[in-house]
Amino acid sequence: MNQNTTADIQEHTVDESICSSENLVYTKPQTLTDDPMHYCPGCGHGTAHKILMEVVDELGLQSQTIGIAPVGCSVFAYHYLNVDMQEAAHGRACAVATGVKRMMPDKYVFTYQGDGDLAAIGTAETIHAANRGENFLVVFINNGIYGMTSGQMAPTTLPGMFSTTSPYGRDVETMGYPLKIADLLALLPGVAYVTRQAVHTPANVRKAKKAMKNAFEYQKKKLGLCLVEIVTNCPSNWKMEPLESNQFVNDKMIPFYQLGDIKKPEVK
């Protein structure tokens, strides 16, 4: 039997005058689907998806945007990004994006790639597309490890950093140095814009979103290839709790992969 008294009911009745005075501060962009994301708890991919699609939504480019998602943790991006999407073979996103952009030059084209895909198996496609000055955006997620395939060492793994294939830490004498792909691409004349950002704090999220917006605006001006690198975490393969992994980004990743614009065009 319901034991609530009239007084109890009145006490818990919502004050409609209070609700009507509240302001809506955020609405999910229509460029993001309602599908639950498969990413591990605390992973930065979800935030990167959100700011990328917020920019597309705010610029009104949903029907004009085409994304390329290759193999890796981001392979299911087409489930979440409500724009035209095309899959690519592992490492071949920049090659596919080249074909798409050349066939439809008025479309806004981006690739969404992890460090294993872009900086390892896809190094050739990435560098040659950049050297040709292909006019699209590369979103580069750098978490210093192979995420989808259980945590092997990536080209971006830090010196001394543990992985399943560097169980005693990355030894630069035998395994080489981490590849700073953004710095490398910035040297090429066909590259218009290179920036390295992060999404582990609200302030950094805002800066990363601004970088995404800049890249779309430069693509409209046909200035050449743009690269937005996002330094982020991988709690599962780093064997850390999400908060701990964000601290690792702040204390270890960012001192090595310093944030900020590496190359920026002079736009009149």
Image: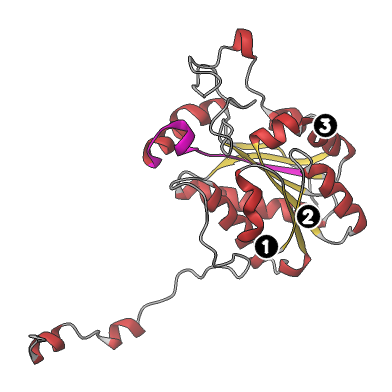
Q: Is residue 240 left or right of residue 194?
A: left
Q: What is the secondary structure assignment of the residue under circle 1? A: helix
| Residue 113, image x, y percentages | 68, 43
Residue at position x 45%, y 38% in the image: 236
Q: CA distance from mark 3 to mark 2?
A: 20 Å
Q: What is the secondary structure assignment of the residue under circle 3? A: loop
**Front tag of 3 and 2:** 2
* Label 2 vs 1, first from the N-terminus: 1
Going by the numbered disc 3, the residue's amino acid type is Leu
| Residue 173, image x, y percentages | 61, 7
Residue at position x 86%, y 34% in the image: 128
For disc 2, the marked residue is 109
Q: Is residue 220 magenta?
A: no
Residue 236 against residue 33 in the figure, above or below? above
Magenta segment boundaries in residue numbering = 226-242
- Which quarter of the rendering shows the N terminus? bottom left
Task: Tell me whether circle 3 and circle 2 mark residues in contact (CB < 8 Å).
Answer: no
Task: Tell me whether circle 1 and circle 3 mark residues in contact (CB < 8 Å).
Answer: no
Residue in the foreground of this view, choosing between 188 and 239:
239
Going by the numbered disc 1, the residue's amino acid type is Val
**Front tag of 1 and 3:** 1
Q: CA distance from mark 1 to mark 3?
A: 27 Å
The disc placed on residue 188 is 3
Outermost residue, front side? 1
Q: Is residue 10 left or right of residue 221?
A: left
Residue 218 appearing in the image: yes
For disc 1, the marked residue is 56
